[in-house]
Amino acid sequence: MIWFAVGIPLVMLVVGVLLIVSAVSDGDTATRSVSMPAEIEVRTPEVSASQADFPEAVRETSVAPQTPWLELDAQTRLTRIGVGSCLSQLHPQPIWEGVLGLKQRPELFLMLGDNVYGDIKSPGGDELIEAYRMQAVQPEFATARAALPFLATWDDHDYGLNDGGADFQHRELSTELFLDFWKMAPPQPAGGIYYSRYFGPDDARVQIIMLDTRSFRSALKVKGDLFPFWGRYEPSFDPDQTMLGEAQWQWLEAELKKPAKIRLLISSIQVLSEGHGFERWGNLAKERARLLQLLGDVGARGTILLSGDRHASAIYYTTVNGSQVVPELTASSLNRPYGPSRDGRTDELLTALFSEANFGLVDIDWERAQVALTIKGVNGETVESLRFKFADLGIEQ
């Protein structure tokens, strides 16, 4: 391994981030420095929510897999989490062989959105219903489901509308189908599918926060001729626009105040990226500023952002409170690559963009007090891997 001290400009701030860039090692990541526990306790629940909790229309035409999802015991000390997005039910899924073939399998896999492609065009939402039914019997995904516990949020194509937001007329139906497929509890009182989970003992507690960036999001501003990057949208500074809706903002603040060593904050769309005009938090500039301000104000140490959507993977970073590093791993896509990205090389981008099929890993080395963020190719080969010290993430030992 080779250590590099890297100074990267961000706006007017220059921050030195100590990173390890890892090489490929026998199909697994060279940054791995912890061993898989001899046995991980995984139990098979009946369901997370009673079928009676779901509307009659969905209960009669359930889209859920016939075999139940695996559930990870809450006391599991997490050392490796898999992440990915953009999984078409219409295409082969060899990516799961790469995931399951790792020397150290993830204890948990996080689906970051576009977990099916079912944009709704018919009054009854037949396209999304059929997409879920196809994914439920997809054989390669079934093999992964039998081996790994999963948690999920959605993005636009499992929401039911490309780039869709709060004004989507089928939002209630898509919510019902999402909860049915993933066997999750009913939605929040104010609507939406956001939730959190906690794993590990107190001294190694990992908080997983799944945001809903669809149900409440305001309309986006179409880009003008002066916007310098490719894409459809440009930043809006309208203070009345929202990404999360006020109820979800209040919930998020309360969650970030809860104790945890490491916080994985999942947004289906990118938070930090500046080099394109597709969906991202930067399109609602005041909302992104509010998010980063909140992380600093509540002292949310150890926060790592995870995102999907872009059909290209990369690692980004910013800082809060002057020196706390907040990295972002974008992992996309699992089986629907679009070809080379034309994103601009902007200051927050730490790695090259990788546009072939891929998944991501979050490796936590509790003994050495480090977190590695890794991008893996379809066969499990390492594409990019950066390691961040706990101290740089603001984690107190």
Image: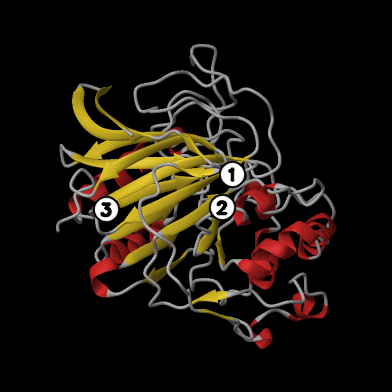
Cα separation between marks 2 and 3: 26 Å
Seen from the viewer's position, the closer of residues 62 and 305 is 305
- Amino acid type for the residue under numbered disc 2: Leu
Q: Are marks 2 and 1 in contact (CB under 8 Å)?
A: yes
Sooner in the amino-acid sequence: mark 2 or mark 3? 2
Find numbered disc 3 in the image and state the secondary structure of the residue it sits on. Answer: loop
Residue 102, labelled with which disc? Answer: 2
In the picture, residue 222 is in which quadrant?
top right
Q: Is 197 above or below relative to 30?
A: below
The residue tagged 3 is 302
Residue 326 point in image, percent of width and height: 30, 42
The reply, left or right, for residue 124 in relation to residue 310 is right
Instruction: Tell me which residue sits at (57%, 76%) in the image.
Output: 186
* The C terminus, quarter of image: bottom left
Badge 2: few (under 14), some or many (20 or more) residues near its Cα, within 10 Å?
A: some
Task: Tell me whether the residue at label 2 lies in contact with that at label 3, contact meaning CB atoms closer than 8 angstroms.
Answer: no
Sequence order check, earlier mark of 1 and 3? 3
Residue 167 pos. (x, y %): 61, 50
Q: Which one is nearer the viewer's eye here, 52 or 66?
A: 66
For the question of whether residue 394 can be seen, the reply is: yes
Residue where numbered disc 1 is placed: 380
